[in-house]
Image (cartoon, rainbow, N blue to C red):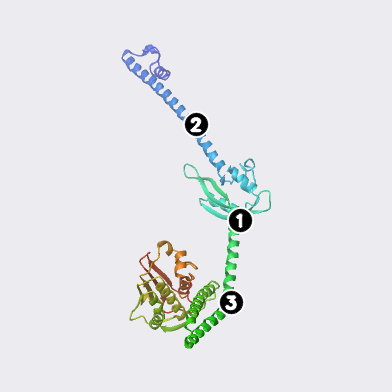
């Protein structure tokens, strides 16, 4: 028998074999082997216990480090962070929340929300907490509160969500609160500035629209007298005066055109545009506009061609606004094209079962860059400053035309590239209801 038996083995031997001397020789080898197994098990158990002890210490250290990092993140956050249990008792209350609500963490932690926040129920905050405890994530925007230490109103937005344990059971809720008081103040100032600018723009537009008669009447007189003097001078043989009188007449007509553009756009901005709906054949209108614009095309040695589809038919819309739109587009094409071609095409099409008209003015002129296309229909905008100096104009023609088309339920689109000409397409419903949709 071994000199030292394992204590567990010794008890078992005494129970079954009595004293050690009673063990027969044939059992002694087996008892020795079992005794060795017991001692090996003890060694393995002690090694395992030591490993578990070390692992536990590492986990405790890692958990402590994670807790420090977590607390640092929570306390360093510019947003307020709070957490509560299922009884709405606060578990987390960071410094940003202290500053936001004027309550110290020491006075909030462990207490129920209704005891910490005086208006918890009246403000509806309790509903947000209950939604989080029910498993819902809620965003509350523009929440009002009173700034600590004053009676001034403040605003915050909150994000409320449930807190889960490892098994997925809800154990509370989390709220992230952001103070948006300054943002709301800036937004209010911007809104007031926007409203003031809009009011000033409306006042300016109303003034210009009301000044239509006062601006046009004297200029019309200047143009009329210039034409009269031109005829009389020509008849009396005063050739030396014809050049100067022609310049006066040309400048007066140009100025009248600019004034008309400004006044038209002012009426649009003032909301004074009215549609005069009537039924008319479109082809004669297009031909008449093209005939009027042929002299302008000839000034730059341009070839002007018309290609209208056989079924163009009639329209029920505002004839004058369609005429003005086509004249604006053709005027631009003639102005920005030299020794080139300008083609006007028109056809009827069916869109969603309704008849529409498509008119296109294409030219082989200077074209439009990609950067300029984005601002093409903005008022008072041309390609660049050199374009204004070289070609003149108010920069309102396309803006007015686009607005007119929108009033008539349609639009103008453009395809162009620098140096490759441009194609402007007008799409309008062939039959416009009395109340046209505004876009």
Element marked by disc 3: helix
- For the residue pair 31 and 247, the one nearer the viewer reads as 247
> Residues at badges 2 and 3 in contact (C-beta under 8 Å)?
no
Image point (55%, 82%), residue name: 221
Residue that carries the numbered disc 1 in the rendered image? 185
| Sequence-earlier tag: 3 or 1 | 1
Residue at 60%, 62% (x, y): give it: 192
Q: CA distance from mark 3 to mark 1?
A: 37 Å
Q: Which residue is mark 3?
A: 210
For the view shown, which residue lies furthest in the bottom direction? Answer: 235
The one of 140 and 279 positioned closer to us in this rendering: 279
Residue shown at 43%/77% (left/top)? 327
Quadrant of the rendered image containing residue 32:
top left
Q: Check contact, mark 3 vs mark 1: CB within 8 A.
A: no
For label 2, the SS is helix
Residue at numbered disc 2: 61
Q: Position of residue 372 (x, y in %)?
A: 43, 63
Crowd rating for badge 3 (residues with CA inside 10 Å; few <14, some 14–19, many 20+): some
> Where is residue 149 drawn, in percent x and y?
68, 48
Which of disc 1 and disc 2 is earlier in sequence?
Answer: 2
- Please tell me whether mark 3 or mark 1 is closer to you in this view: 3
> Which of the 4 image quadrants contains residue 329?
bottom left
Residue at the image position 31 percent from the left and 14 percent from the top: 26
């Amino acid at each position: 028998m071994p000199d030292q038996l394992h204590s567990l083995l010794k008890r078992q031997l005494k129970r079954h074999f009595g004293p050690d001397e009673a063990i027969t020789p044939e059992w002694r080898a087996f008892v020795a082997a079992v005794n060795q197994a017991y001692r090996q098990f003890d060694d393995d158990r002690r090694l395992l216990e030591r490993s578990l002890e070390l692992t536990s210490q590492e986990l405790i250290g890692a958990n402590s480090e994670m807790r420090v990092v977590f607390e640092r993140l929570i306390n360093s956050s510019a947003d307020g962070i709070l957490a509560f249990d299922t009884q709405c008792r606060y578990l987390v209350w960071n410094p940003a929340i202290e500053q936001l609500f004027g309550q110290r963490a020491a006075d909030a932690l462990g207490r129920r929300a209704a005891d910490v926040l005086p208006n918890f129920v009246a403000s509806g905050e309790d509903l947000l907490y209950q939604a989080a405890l029910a498993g819902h994530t809620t965003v509350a925007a523009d929440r009002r509160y009173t700034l600590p230490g004053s009676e001034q109103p403040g605003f915050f937005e909150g994000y409320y969500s449930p807190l889960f344990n490892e098994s997925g059971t809800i154990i509370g809720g989390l709220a992230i609160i952001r103070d948006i008081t300054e943002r709301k103040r800036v937004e209010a100032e911007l809104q007031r500035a926007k409203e003031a600018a809009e009011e000033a723009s409306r006042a300016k537009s109303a003034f210009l629209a009301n000044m239509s008669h006062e601006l046009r009447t004297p200029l019309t007189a200047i143009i009329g007298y210039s034409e009269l003097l031109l005829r009389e001078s020509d008849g009396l043989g005063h050739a030396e005066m014809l050049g100067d009188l022609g310049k006066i007449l040309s400048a007066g007509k140009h100025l009248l055109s600019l004034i008309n553009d400004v006044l038209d756009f002012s009426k649009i901005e003032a909301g004074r545009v009215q549609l005069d709906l009537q039924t008319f054949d479109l082809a004669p209108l297009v031909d008449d506009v093209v005939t009027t614009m042929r002299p302008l095309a000839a000034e730059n040695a341009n070839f002007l061609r018309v290609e209208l589809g056989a079924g163009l038919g009639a329209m029920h819309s505002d004839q004058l606004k369609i005429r003005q739109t086509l004249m604006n587009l053709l005027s631009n094409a003639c102005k920005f094209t030299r020794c080139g071609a300008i083609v006007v095409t028109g056809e009827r099409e069916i869109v969603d079962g309704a008849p529409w008209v498509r008119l296109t003015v294409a030219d082989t002129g200077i074209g439009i860059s990609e950067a300029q296309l984005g601002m093409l229909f903005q008022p008072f905008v041309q390609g660049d400053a050199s374009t204004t100096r070289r070609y003149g104009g108010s920069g309102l023609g396309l803006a007015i035309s686009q607005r007119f088309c929108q009033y008539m339920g349609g639009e103008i689109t453009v395809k162009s590239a620098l140096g490759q000409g441009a194609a402007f397409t007008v799409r309008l419903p062939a039959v416009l209801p009395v109340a046209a949709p505004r876009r």
